[in-house]
Image (cartoon, helix red, strand yellow):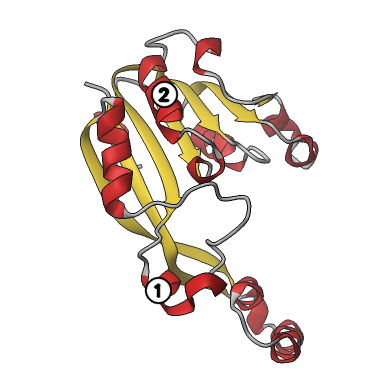
Amino acid sequence: QKYLGNLPDREGAVDIGAGDGAFCERLIALGFTGITGVEPSSAPIAAATPRAQELLDHRVFRGDDFIPNSVSLVSCFQVMEHVPNPLEIASAALRILKPHGLLLTVVHNQRAMSARLLGLKSPIYDIEHLQLFTKETGRRLLESAGFRDVRVYSLWNRYPLQYWMRLFPFPPSLKSGLISFAKRSGLGAINTPLPAGNIVLLGFKP
């Protein structure tokens, strides 16, 4: 919302790796039109609301499937780690964006405090993550693709406390007891913001 005033308009948005379309629905609420959520997995699409399903396209994102200079926003949340060539995705986003359009992406930060404390037990070290980023390499990714006015900052995630407990590498017996207590007491349902080690990368097309 902070950057809406910098966009050329709110006509055209693509969400790469859209999941169940929750962010697409948020874009509707913000006044965007012409929204497409690209999602390669069928399971989250099946779980989406009827309104979100109308916006979801079941396939892998390819820049050539979109008209160049046709959208104002491309979003891509925790997807770059899963693709073999992040620069290809960023470059495709640049092509389909209108001048002064925005690419907004979120990636894991390999140098975050949580990652340094937990080491290889950190959830970011996942067999599905083909690469990890730092603030420096994230900035370099967007600048190498041709984006300007690139901004990078840490993101606080808000999840129920029991979700954080499942992620933290407690001993199994202790984890099970803690989660059970959190559920019974109601504490587990409390939304808790934490700096989980994610970073926001955003850049504008010249």
Residue 100: give x, y in percent of width and height.
26, 22
- Residue at left offset 50%, top offset 21%: 33
For residue 35, which quarter of the picture?
top right
Q: Residues within 10 Å of mark 1 (few under 14, many from 20)?
A: few
Which SS class for mark 1? helix
> Relative to residue 84, is residue 185 depicted above or below?
below
Residue 93 — which label? 2
Which residue is tagged 1?
116
Q: Amino acid at mark 1?
A: Arg
Q: Is residue 45 above or below residue 101?
A: below
Disc 2 packing (10 Å; few <14; some 14–19; many ≥20): many
- 122 horizontally vs 147: left or right: right
| Residue 70 in view of the camera | yes
Q: Is residue 13 above or below residue 149?
A: above
Residue 23: where, in percent of width, then height? 55, 40
Position of residue 56 in the picture relative to residue 64 (left or right): right
Mark 1 vs mark 2, CA separation in Å: 31 Å
Q: Amino acid at mark 2?
A: Ala
